[in-house]
Image: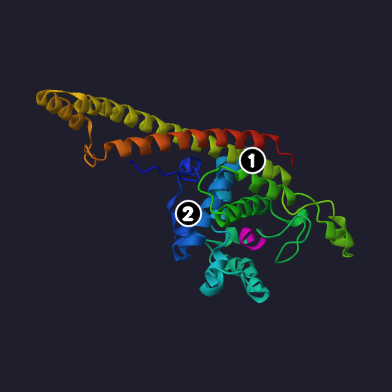
């Protein structure tokens, strides 16, 4: 059976922006990252690029924002690999070390004139609007807008990766979790610090940006549906071919004369492809039918996800 693969992140928008040689040199630092962090950085850049398009930023700002997103986790180059890639839950001490990737990223960018323009995003992408983020506990008015965008994309991709989504089915559950981060933290009301009390009505992430992420996710679901529909066309064509072979096969088995049996056998063989033969083509036909039913069911679930997302309130 033909292999079906789906790219969870449709990068069509990202590829439409031509990065100049300087930017490509700047991005070469990604090659020093571990594969997981590099992939995450690429995913976040993809999402940020498309959110910025929905914000109607001009091309220069979109590219600048996308580059910031690519390099937001550059500080993880300084985090010990045994902590960065630890499969088990981090200890409190290890989490504190992980958190230093923001300040380390800032330092890396500031030391390199080519990267200095990305330093603030490396530093601020874990800050929260209500002042509960790190490393400096900044509040909304002090957090660069691009950092607010990167934070939303960063959280979304982190959850997607952790939950190992291969399709957008049930992706609305992740978006519901992100909606919680737009709401005020109850415990903030108990904290006496003035800056937190001043921001007690804010959540951690920007609700407007999250709404635009919803649009990006819906775009990706539509892209996934289109990809599945193309695969369904392939399956239907293969099923039709093998059902024709099956009709010849049945006629062969009911034929009385040897001449007719051989005629229908040759008809079967003419319809089979390289890896198929008279002994296995019916099994392959059933596999195609099962796959077709599964993919048609997936389209129904994906369309339902779109309906759910459109009803979500932020």
Viewport quadrant of the N terminus: top left
* 231 with respect to 203 (left or right): left
Q: Which residues are magenta?
A: 120-124
| Cβ atoms at labels 2 and 1 below 8 Å apart | no
Please state which of residues 44 and 143 is positioned toward the viewer in this rendering: 44
Circle 2 residue: 23
Q: Is residue 204 magenta?
A: no
Sequence order check: which comes first, mark 2 or mark 1? Answer: 2
The quadrant in which residue 267 appears is top left
Residue located 64% across and 63% down the image: 123
Q: Circle 1 is placed at which residue position?
A: 214
Q: Residue at x 74, y 39 (%)?
A: 313
Q: Is residue 198 visible?
A: yes
Residue 234 picture location, percent across and down: 36, 32
Decide: is 235 above or below 95: above
Badge 2, how many Cα within 10 Å: few under 14, some, many 20+? Answer: some
Which residue is more in the foreground, 186 or 198?
186
Q: Nearer the viewer, residue 252 or 79?
A: 252
Relative horizontal placement of residue 208, taking residue 41 as reference (left or right): right
Residue 261 placement: quadrant: top left
**Which dot, 2 or 1, sits closer to the camera?**
1
Is the residue marked by circle 1 packed among few (<14), some (14-19), or many (20+) residues within 10 Å?
A: some
Residue at the spot 69% in from the left edge and 50% down from the top edge: 177
Mark 2–mark 1 Cα distance, whole angstroms, equals 29 Å
Relative image position of residue 74 (x, y in whole percent):
55, 64
Task: State whether residue 100 is above or below residue 36.
Answer: below
Task: Label 1, secondary structure: give it.
Answer: helix
Considering the whole magenta stretch, tell me its main secondary structure: helix
């Amino acid at each position: 059976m033909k292999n079906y693969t789906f790219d969870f992140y449709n990068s069509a928008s990202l590829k439409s922006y031509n990065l100049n040689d300087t930017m490509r040199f700047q991005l070469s630092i990604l090659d020093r990252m571990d594969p997981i962090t590099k992939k995450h950085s690429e995913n976040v850049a993809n999402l940020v690029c498309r959110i910025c398009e929905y914000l109607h930023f001009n091309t220069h700002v979109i590219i600048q924002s996308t580059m910031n997103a690519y390099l937001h986790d550059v500080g993880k180059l300084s985090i010990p690999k045994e902590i960065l890639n630890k499969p088990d839950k981090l200890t409190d001490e290890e989490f504190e070390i992980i958190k230093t990737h923001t300040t380390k990223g800032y330092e890396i960018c500031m030391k390199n004139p080519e990267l200095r323009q990305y330093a603030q995003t490396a530093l601020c992408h874990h800050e929260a609007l209500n002042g509960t983020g790190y490393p400096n506990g900044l509040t909304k008015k002090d957090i660069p807008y691009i950092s607010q965008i990167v934070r939303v994309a960063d959280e979304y991709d982190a959850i997607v990766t952790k939950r190992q989504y291969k399709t957008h089915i049930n992706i609305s559950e992740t978006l519901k979790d992100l909606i919680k981060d737009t709401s005020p933290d109850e415990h903030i009301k108990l904290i006496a610090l003035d800056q937190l009390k001043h921001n007690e009505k804010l959540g951690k992430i920007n609700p407007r940006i999250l709404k635009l992420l919803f649009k990006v996710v819906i775009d990706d679901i539509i892209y996934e549906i289109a990809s599945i529909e193309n695969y369904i066309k392939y399956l239907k064509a293969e099923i039709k071919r093998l059902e024709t072979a099956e009709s010849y096969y049945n006629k062969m088995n009911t034929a009385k004369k040897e001449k007719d049996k051989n005629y229908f056998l040759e008809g079967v063989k003419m319809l089979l492809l390289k890896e198929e033969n008279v002994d296995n083509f019916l099994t392959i036909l059933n596999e195609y039918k099962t796959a077709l039913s599964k993919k048609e069911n997936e389209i129904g679930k994906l369309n339902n996800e779109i309906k759910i997302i459109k009803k979500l309130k932020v």
